[in-house]
Image (cartoon, rainbow, N blue to C red):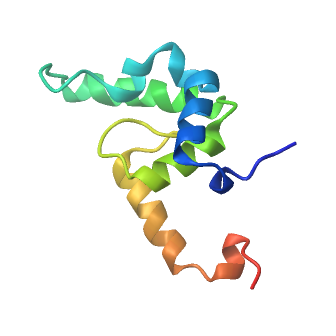
Amino acid sequence: MTVDPSALSLVDLVTELAERGECRHDPDLHMGPDAFESEPIAERLARQDVARQVCEDCPVWDLCLDYALRIRPTWGVWAGYLPRELAALRREARSLPAAALGEVA
């Protein structure tokens, strides 16, 4: 049975991501070093590329994308997207008619 991610609460989404997300094996890969560590640009880009590859095979990719679109993260790789890419997806979704988003009037 498939569950519509938008029907889940944020708590339920976080639980699913923590239990089944591929990123749970190496969260630093997706989030990067903490604020007190420097990360050279080339290393950051390489890390983000690997994180995106991990996201491609994730069994909860759709849940992660829904979660990220809701919480609007400011850092990290979420469902293979960077925060600026997620913002662009949100803007694009707002410009689509409701029928294109699968909503029934």
Which residue occupies 47% across, 24% down? 50
Q: Is residue 33 above or below residue 82?
A: above
As drawn, 4 above or below 1: below
For image coordinates 48% across by 54% down, the residue present is 69
The one nearer the camera, 21 or 7, is 7
Measured as percent of width and height from the top left, residue 101 is found at 67, 71
Residue at the extreme top: 25
Question: Which residue sits at x=29%, y=46%?
Answer: 74
* Left/right of residue 31 with respect to residue 93 in the rendered view: left
The quarter of the image holding the N terminus is top right
From the viewer's perspective, tell me whether residue 50 is left or right of residue 56. Answer: left
Labels in figure, total: 0
Q: Relative to 38, is 98 above or below?
A: below
- Horizontal and vertical percent for residue 57? 66, 29
Q: Position of residue 11 (x, y in %)?
A: 53, 40
Above/below status of 8 relative to 22: below
Classify residue 79 as left or right of residue 38. right
Of all residues, the one furthest to the right in this rendering is: 1
* Residue at image point 74% right, 85% down: 105
* Depth check, front residue: 103 or 33: 103
Q: Quadrant of residue 6?
A: bottom right
